[in-house]
């Protein structure tokens, strides 16, 4: 009995304000509160509230047979708490149905696994606490930022006690195997890999409104037909996508919400198919061999690698610079400073600096509030320079301050 | 082709552009180039270059010329001069002197006079209008005995000649705009040069503009039909320039260009003041001179920025290369810059650029940092970042250098050639 496993990614970064060199040393607030609030308002109206309402009514209509999962970054949850408690409430209403699973991720939606295991563990822990506090459940399945994945990450996360991990189903790794089964990392039976079916996921997330696509317009019956074709050759179809697909990337006028509300009834027309959350999929099916990924992969761009965040020397420089402050930051024992620093680890800041395809005015530009990747880098680095200054001036160890006075 | 600045004599981008273009075009086009001053040091094979400084009597109709030369003074009267930035000295004195001197010229003396006038190492100078007038007369005469298909005139100083030759031969005229009077003297200017430009732009069969920016200016200020204006960006010869280190511990921000209102010296000063506050270990090197020189010098002193500026004066090509090879940032805050070929030269020296958005170079250089000409906060932030963040400096200089591969004169020549073809088939 094959399952559809939906997981939606909900994330909002704390965007930085325009921070030029004249602010360094004088202005220690870095975020653009107005813009963050505006964007959350817009996305809430266009996406979160409408999609939550749609999904809640589906859950009610199918009396527990329609089931979904979310991963919500800590920075998104915090912004909802601050600016849109009504949106947070609508997620809590979904959680209360018992048909919704919440996944684990790094609190700050960061690439911390690559730079600091200590910080990674801290963020995963902080996120778990937040999920428990807001949704009263403890996540058991982990999804790393932007599905960044390899064997090492899976093994590490397994050590932390997670039972499952979401990742991209890469053709060149799968070979003749299908993403529609569960796998485990080489020599590790303690954790299950849930592979994204990128074709069917991206049909919804990216191609839905593309009029040049030969399958346009995509209707619920058509999509359900494709899903049904997998019968006999798969146990779970993992449809992983950004939640903002609904209403924000694909506008309501494209019919995306109609599509969503009609999908379950079309899927159910084939009696064998059902909906399950990631942990239910893992409970229902066993793994069918190894999924062996050495190089880091992700779900981004056509490369499905890390080049969107670590593709040029500016991104490496910014990333190394901010992580190099970790020790000093943590030595302050000041929660506020640690939080200020950690918010700068959010992957979006580095994504804005991506120069790949920049000239073609592509998707990266769509997601960035900067005119150019260079502006993104300069703004970020000015902020980091100020943070370094704050560390030096305000958090210098006592004995060093004394020494300075002596001199 | 009618040109004005040409190596080794030039004061701005026009000479560099004319030379680069002719060099790239000559393999496919038979070029006869008339310029005021020619030196064999800049000869090009396959190009017939006629310099008025060494024109032979047989190429001219001396009788006709003598008459014209006498006529020169009265013609000049018709051109009221509010010539910026090229003139500084009282026109009247020169005009009277010339009137007396030319009254009883023999043809030998006339030719000698022509050679002298065009041997001046300053191709503009106080008597630029005399030169323009004379250039127009002589070019028209020379063209009469020449075979050619297209007239290609560079900037206002040759436009009158282009118009005359078009009228007398009926050949198609292409005017090439490297700079407009509205750039040099301000948007609102409506002087005789403006009107000359307007007449030539209107009468021309096709117009080349060195940027989209300039094309828009031509449409806006001169009311020319945009469909006949072709954007032909300037190029640069491929090549790699070595970096040099300098002795000072300070970093160098280089400004290259005439110190005139057009080049934005006000904004240079304001930016320098802002940068030095947040990044004291910097020197602004100013290479070039002009009517704003004293003002810039005095203001920098008044603002206590004297130690932050190095005024290098007008530099030779070799000196410019040396300066750029040591520069950390190239800064071009022009109020209105049709192209700004120096920005490409800076990139060739691996120097990242901070450019005015009101420039043609900004259109083609993706990896430059751009701000509106008046936005000195933004300029300063960019310059600060390039001085402070090494990886940014390196990334931008590398990608700018890579961009130059697509900005060669061959590329420019190809576009020009295509328009020539169209004109000849129509």
Image: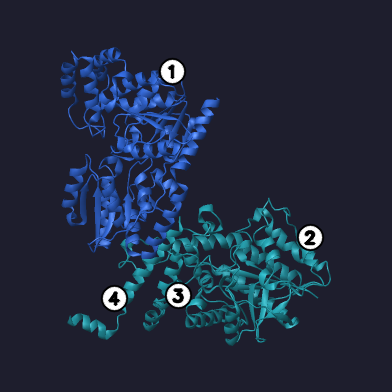
Chain colours: A cyan, B blue
C-alpha span from label 1 to label 3: 75 Å
Mark 2 or mark 1, whichever is nearer to me: 1
Q: Position of residue A387 (x, y in %)?
A: 36, 72
Residue that label 1 marks: B169
Pointer 3 or 2: first along the chain? 2
Q: Compared to B104, does A271 lie above or below?
A: below
Image side of residue A236 versus residue B310, left or right: right
Q: Nearer the viewer, residue B138 or A283?
A: B138
- Numbered label attached to residue A221: 2
Pinpoint the chain carrying mark 1.
B
Image side of residue A212 versus residue B189, left or right: right
C-alpha span from label 3 to label 2: 45 Å
Image side of residue B114 versus residue A377, left or right: left
Mark 1 or mark 3, whichever is nearer to me: 1
Residue that label 3 marks: A342
Residue that label 4 marks: A393
Pinpoint the chain carrying mark 2.
A
Do the residues marked 2 and 1 share a common chain?
no
Assess disc 2: are there few (<14), some (14-19) or many (≥20) residues with their C-alpha within 10 Å of its C-alpha. some
Pinpoint the chain carrying mark 4.
A
* Residue name at image x 45 percent, y 72 percent: A343
* Residue name at image x 48 percent, y 42 percent: B411
Q: Nearer the viewer, residue B95 or A180?
A: B95
Q: Compared to B95, does A389 lie above or below?
A: below
Pointer 2 or 4: first along the chain? 2
Assess disc 1: are there few (<14), some (14-19) or many (≥20) residues with their C-alpha within 10 Å of its C-alpha. some
The answer to the question of whether label 2 and label 1 lie on touching residues, with beta carbons closer than 8 A, is no
Q: Position of residue A50 (x, y in %)?
A: 64, 62
- Image quadrant holding the C terminus of chain A, namely bottom left
């Amino acid at each position: 009995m094959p399952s559809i496993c939906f997981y939606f990614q909900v994330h909002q970064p704390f965007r930085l304000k325009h921070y030029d060199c004249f602010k360094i040393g004088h202005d220690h607030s870095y975020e653009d509160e107005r813009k963050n609030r505006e964007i959350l308002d817009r996305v809430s109206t266009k996406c979160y509230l409408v999609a939550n309402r749609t999904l809640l009514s589906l859950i009610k209509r199918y009396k527990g047979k329609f089931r979904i999962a979310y991963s919500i970054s800590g920075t998104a949850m915090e912004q909802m708490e601050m600016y849109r408690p009504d949106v947070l409430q609508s997620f809590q209403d979904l959680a209360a149905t018992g048909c919704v699973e919440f996944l684990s991720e790094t609190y700050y939606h960061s690439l911390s696994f690559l730079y600091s295991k200590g910080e990674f563990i801290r963020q995963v822990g902080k996120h778990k606490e937040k999920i428990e506090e807001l949704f009263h459940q403890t996540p058991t399945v982990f999804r790393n930022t932007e599905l960044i994945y390899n064997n090492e990450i899976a093994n590490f996360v397994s050590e932390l006690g997670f039972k499952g991990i979401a990742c991209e189903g890469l053709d060149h790794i799968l070979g003749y195997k299908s993403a529609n089964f569960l796998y485990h990392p080489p020599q590790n039976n303690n954790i299950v890999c849930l592979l994204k079916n990128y074709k069917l996921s991206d049909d919804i997330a990216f191609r839905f409104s593309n009029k040049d696509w030969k399958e346009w317009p995509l209707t619920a019956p058509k999509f359900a037909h494709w899903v049904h074709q997998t019968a006999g050759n798969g146990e779970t179809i993992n449809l992983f996508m950004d939640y903002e697909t609904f209403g924000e990337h694909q506008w309501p006028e494209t019919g995306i919400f109609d599509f969503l509300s009609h999908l379950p009834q079309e899927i159910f027309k084939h009696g064998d198919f059902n909906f399950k959350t990631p942990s239910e999929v893992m409970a229902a099916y066993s793994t069918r061999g190894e999924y062996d990924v050495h190089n880091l992969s992700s779900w981004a761009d056509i490369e499905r690698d890390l080049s969107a965040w670590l593709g040029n020397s500016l991104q490496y420089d910014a990333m190394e610079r901010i992580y190099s402050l970790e020790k000093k930051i943590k030595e302050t024992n000041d929660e506020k400073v640690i939080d200020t620093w950690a918010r700068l680890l959010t992957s979006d800041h580095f994504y804005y600096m991506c120069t790949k395809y920049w000239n073609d005015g592509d998707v990266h530009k769509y997601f960035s509030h900067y005119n150019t990747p260079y502006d993104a880098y300069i703004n970020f680095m000015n902020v980091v320079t100020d943070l370094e200054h704050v560390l030096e001036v305000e958090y210098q160890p006592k004995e060093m301050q004394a020494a300075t006075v002596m001199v | 082709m009618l040109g004005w600045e040409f190596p080794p004599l030039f004061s701005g981008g026009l000479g560099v552009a004319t030379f680069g273009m002719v060099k790239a075009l000559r393999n496919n086009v038979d070029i006869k180039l008339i310029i005021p001053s020619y030196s064999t040091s800049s000869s090009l094979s396959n190009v017939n270059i006629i310099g008025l400084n060494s024109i032979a009597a047989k190429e001219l109709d001396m009788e006709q010329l003598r008459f014209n030369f006498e006529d020169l003074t009265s013609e000049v009267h018709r051109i009221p001069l509010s010539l910026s930035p090229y003139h500084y000295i009282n026109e009247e004195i020169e005009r009277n002197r010339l009137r007396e001197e030319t009254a009883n010229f023999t043809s030998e003396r006339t030719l000698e006079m022509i050679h002298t006038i065009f041997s001046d190492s300053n191709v503009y100078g106080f008597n630029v209008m005399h030169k323009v007038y004379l250039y127009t007369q002589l070019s028209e005469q020379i063209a009469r005995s020449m075979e050619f298909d297209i007239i290609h005139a560079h900037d206002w100083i040759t436009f009158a000649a282009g118009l005359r030759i078009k009228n007398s031969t009926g050949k198609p005229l292409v005017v090439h705009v490297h700079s407009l009077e509205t750039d040099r003297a301000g948007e609102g200017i409506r002087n005789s040069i403006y009107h000359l430009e307007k007449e030539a732009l209107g009468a021309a069969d096709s117009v080349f503009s060195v940027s989209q920016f300039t094309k828009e200016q031509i449409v806006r200020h001169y009311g020319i039909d945009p469909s006949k204006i072709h954007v032909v960006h300037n190029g640069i010869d491929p090549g790699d320039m070595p970096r040099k280190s300098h002795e000072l511990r300070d970093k160098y921000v280089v400004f290259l260009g005439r110190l005139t209102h057009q080049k934005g010296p006000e904004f240079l000063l304001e930016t320098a003041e802002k940068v030095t506050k947040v990044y004291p270990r910097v020197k602004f090197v100013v290479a070039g001179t002009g009517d704003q020189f004293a003002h810039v010098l005095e203001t920098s002193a008044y603002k206590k920025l004297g130690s932050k500026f190095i005024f290098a004066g007008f530099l030779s090509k070799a000196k410019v290369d040396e300066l750029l090879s040591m520069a950390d940032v190239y800064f071009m805050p022009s109020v209105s810059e049709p192209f700004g070929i120096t920005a490409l030269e800076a990139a060739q020296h691996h120097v990242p650029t901070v450019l005015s958005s009101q420039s043609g170079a900004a259109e083609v250089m993706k990896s430059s940092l751009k701000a509106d000409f008046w936005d000195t906060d933004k300029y300063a932030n960019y310059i600060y970042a390039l001085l402070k963040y090494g990886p940014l400096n390196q990334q931008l200089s590398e990608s700018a250098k890579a961009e130059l591969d697509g900005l060669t004169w061959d590329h420019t020549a190809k576009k020009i050639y295509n328009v020539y073809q169209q004109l000849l088939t129509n």
